[in-house]
Amino acid sequence: MVNTRITLSGVWVALMLTYLLGDVMRIFAGDFNAGEMGGQTATQWMWFAAALLMLIPIVMVVLTLMVPYPAIRWVCIVAAGFLFVFNAVSVHTYPGHYDKFLIIVGLAFNVLTIWLAAAWRTPA
């Protein structure tokens, strides 16, 4: 059986790549306007908030491998839960079917992360 830490870290990587795939496809599909977020001119604070949000799965890859059990179990549950709610609320704002599909895939990765972390009982 694969170590739970490695499995969780792998799911965080998959989530991060799903987000990045959506961003790249949005660029190639032309479903964005440079310098805008949500139809309004983006400020430096908006870009900073977007960077923080996108850093969550990246940081979780490292934290999952380094933070001691059982603390990391709860960090994974809270982070995945936050991202699930954030994306579930905003899925309707994306214009493309590909975007909605990738958000749903990301939601599935969030559910998988929560399930794996909640089922993690031993410090393997």
Image (spheres, grey):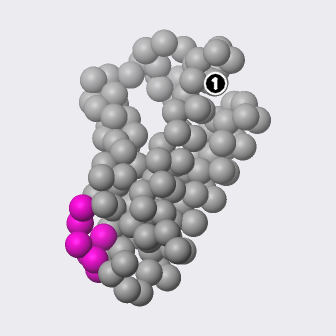
| Residue 88 picture location, percent across and down | 59, 54
The C terminus lies in quadrant: bottom left
Q: Which residue of the protein is positioned furthest toward the bottom in this rendering?
A: 121
Identity of the residue drawn at 53% across and 48% down? 14
Inspect the image, locate mark 1, and give the three-letter code of the amino acid beneath it: Met
Judging by the rendered image, the residue that carries numbered circle 1 is: 25
| Range covered by the magenta-colored residues | 66-72
| Residue 1 picture location, percent across and down | 52, 74
Identity of the residue drawn at 66% across and 42% down? 102
Q: Quadrant of residue 100?
A: top right
| Residue 33 picture location, percent across and down | 54, 14
**In this rendering, is residue 61 above or below 29?**
below
Residue 70 is one of the magenta-drawn residues: yes
**In this rendering, is residue 103 above or below 79?**
above
One can see residue 81 in this view: no
Residue 63 is one of the magenta-drawn residues: no
Q: Nearer the viewer, residue 73 or 80?
A: 73
For the residue carrying disc 1, how many other residues have a C-alpha within 10 Å: few (<14), some (14-19), or many (20+)?
some
Q: Secondary structure at mark 1?
A: helix
One can see residue 64 in this view: yes
**Is 52 positioned to the left or the right of 110 in the image?**
left
Q: Quadrant of residue 73?
A: bottom left
Q: Quadrant of residue 79?
A: bottom left
Q: Which residue of the protein is positioned furthest toward the right in this rendering?
A: 97
**In this rendering, is residue 58 above or below 65?**
above
Identity of the residue drawn at 52% across and 33% down? 20
Q: Which residue of the protein is positioned furthest toward the front in this rendering?
A: 1
Q: Nearer the viewer, residue 46 or 116?
A: 116
